[in-house]
Image: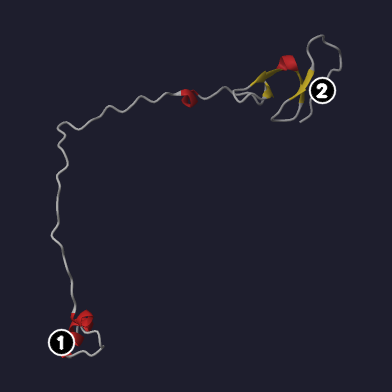
């Protein structure tokens, strides 16, 4: 895309380069976008989206009838298996049935 540049002198209107498309424009043909970049008005400029400035309200939802936490204590559980009880590695028939699930 080529653009015809007229090299005539305009006082106070210097040449700048668009930071997005890298084309030369007069400063009067450019704007600053919301990020602070100098961009051309015809192709690269876009306004800031309204959702960028939305302020979130704090959530005021609370439970209707709060209660304090109860202290639940669980009974201690102990699991012992016949295989764990024999430390020497010798098993009788009931231990093998329990471990393998066969009878």
Quadrant (top left, top right, bottom left, bottom right) of the C terminus: bottom left
Q: Residue at x 78, y 13 (%)?
A: 13
Query: Label 1: which residue?
Result: 94
Up the image or down, 66 lies above or below 14; here it is below
Query: Quick one: SS at disc 1?
Result: helix
Query: In the rendering, at what x and y percent does residue 22 appear?
Result: 74, 30
* Label 1: few (<14), some (14–19) or many (≥20) C-alpha neighbours in 10 Å: few
* Residue drawn at (14%, 53%) of the image: 73
Extreme top residue here? 11
**Residue 60, relative to residue 92: is it above or below?**
above
Q: Residue furthest front?
A: 88
The image shows residue 60 at horizontal and vertical percentages of: 27, 27
Determine whether, in the image, residue 35 is placed left or right of residue 69.
Answer: right
Q: Which mark is in front, 2 or 1?
A: 1
Quadrant of the rendered image containing residue 32? top right
Q: CA distance from mark 2 to mark 1?
A: 97 Å
Vertical side of 11 occupied by 66: above or below: below
| Nearer to me, 41 or 96 | 96
The 10 Å Cα crowd at callout 2, few under 14, some 14 to 19, many 20 or more, is few
Residue hosting label 2: 4
Q: Is 96 or 18 nearer to us in this picture?
A: 96
- From the viewer's perspective, is residue 94 above or below residue 26? below
Q: Residue 68: where, in percent of width, then height?
A: 16, 38
Disc 2 + disc 1, Cβ < 8 Å:
no
User: In x, y percent, where is residue 41?
Assistant: 67, 20
Mark positioned earlier in the residue sequence (2 or 1): 2
Please report the residue visible at 23 percent of the width from the left and 83 percent of the height from the top. Answer: 100
Labelled disc at residue 75: none
Judge left or right: residue 18 versus residue 53: right
Q: Name the quarter where the N terminus is drawn.
A: top right
Of 81 and 40, the residue lying toward us: 81
The residue drawn where x is 52% and y is 25% is: 49
């Amino acid at each position: 895309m080529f653009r015809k540049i007229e090299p005539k002198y305009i006082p106070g209107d210097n040449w700048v380069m668009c930071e997005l498309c890298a084309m030369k424009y007069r400063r009067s043909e450019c704007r600053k976008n919301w990020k602070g970049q100098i961009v051309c008005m015809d192709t690269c400029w876009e306004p800031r989206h309204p959702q960028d400035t939305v302020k979130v309200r704090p959530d005021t939802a609370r439970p209707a009838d709060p209660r304090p936490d109860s202290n639940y204590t669980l009974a201690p559980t102990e699991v012992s298996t016949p295989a764990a009880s024999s430390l020497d590695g010798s098993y009788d028939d009931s231990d093998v049935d329990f471990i393998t699930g066969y009878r």
